[in-house]
Image (tube, helix red, strand yellow):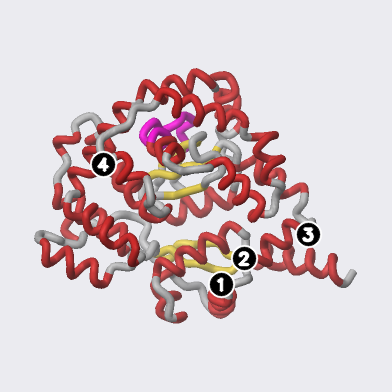
Amino acid sequence: MNITIKNELDPLFEIFSLLLLCHTQNWKEELVSQLDDYGVNGRAFFEEELNVFEKYVDTFQKYRITGREETALFEHVSYDTSLLILALAVEKRSCLEHPENLELQELRSLLAYFITDTGEHTRLPETAELPNLPDENALLDFMDTADVKDEEKWFVLNLLRKADYWLSCLFETVNANKKAYDKALEAVEKPLLRLIEQSSSCSDPEFLKIAGTCADAPLLRPTLAMPLIQIVLYKSGYFGLFTEALAANEASCRQSKDAVLRQLKALGDKSKLDILCALKDDHMYNLKLSEHLGLSPSTVSHHMNVLLGSGFITVEKKEGKVYYCLHREHISQFISALEHMLIS
């Protein structure tokens, strides 16, 4: 696998993520609830492990500057749509200092590709192969068939209409908050250095496998602003500085009722079970699975994220495409744990 790990934070990713947190009401309670759903004691884990993260966010929020159109970009926007904006910003980071160089048609094409991407290809197509949306009619035709939630179609349409304006506003806001980011770094300097040293090798083999399979020679960086995330974009990937702590907590209770319950929850949807049954017979890429099961590609992607996180599936690359397959060893371990609890 051709993977590079850079042991330093990415200011663009950090500031974007911190701004997103600043516009999320009760973000701490939401995170605790998500940890509970994951199968760990969310309150205890937060208080034992995430004090540094909380101080980082609070310090940034204390010094941050509100930017142009910031509310429109960060409030009432779903996580999936936030990822679209983030992917565009990361892809066009070369224009961060010179947003006047952003080109509307190029940004439209990239955004349209991100919206329609089914995740089976490991690299961005050449510019000539990207969707072409030169005018309003083309935009409306695209939105008619785009796999976007109804309540967000108007926002996404406006994002496509003025992609250069919106990304310019975002870059201005990021630049305006570099001092707030520096203050946040200073507030957690010593523990942050220790965390980065501890995670320098990114020792999660499953994440490394996914990153190497789903992206083209990705550059991986740690993140404190999203401390529990593992995400792979087209050329970049990010791993939270507390993912190893979460994995250790999970490993210590791998055969506990909470851990098994979390995996059972992942199977509590017929569509997810249908996916596993389909993968029993053959490895499939996203679009083939969506056609086979009659689901939208975005729905399949959502289910896949849950199944990947629960350890039931993994990925492999064949002929330049990303295929999903059962993680048979993990499934066997889950069945054994369930059998141990209920029968043995």
Work out whether mark 3 precedes mark 1 in sequence or the reverse, and give the earlier one. Answer: 3
Q: What amino acid is labelled 2 in the image?
A: Ala
Q: Which residue is mark 4?
A: 92
Give the label on residue 272, or none. Answer: 1
Q: How many numbered marks, from 0 up?
A: 4
Q: Magenta region: which residues?
A: 5-15
SS of the residue at dot 1? Answer: helix
Q: What amino acid is labelled 4 in the image?
A: Lys
Q: Residue at x 52, y 77 (%)?
A: 282
| 186 to 87, vertically: above or below | above
Q: Which residue is mark 3?
A: 257
Marks 2 and 1 sit apart, C-alpha to C-alpha, by 7 Å
The percent coordinates of residue 47 (x first, y second) are 68, 35
Marks 3 and 1 sit apart, C-alpha to C-alpha, by 21 Å
The percent coordinates of residue 69 (x first, y second) are 26, 40
Work out whether mark 1 precedes mark 4 in sequence or the reverse, and give the earlier one. Answer: 4
| 69 to 137, vertically: above or below | above
SS of the residue at dot 3? Answer: helix
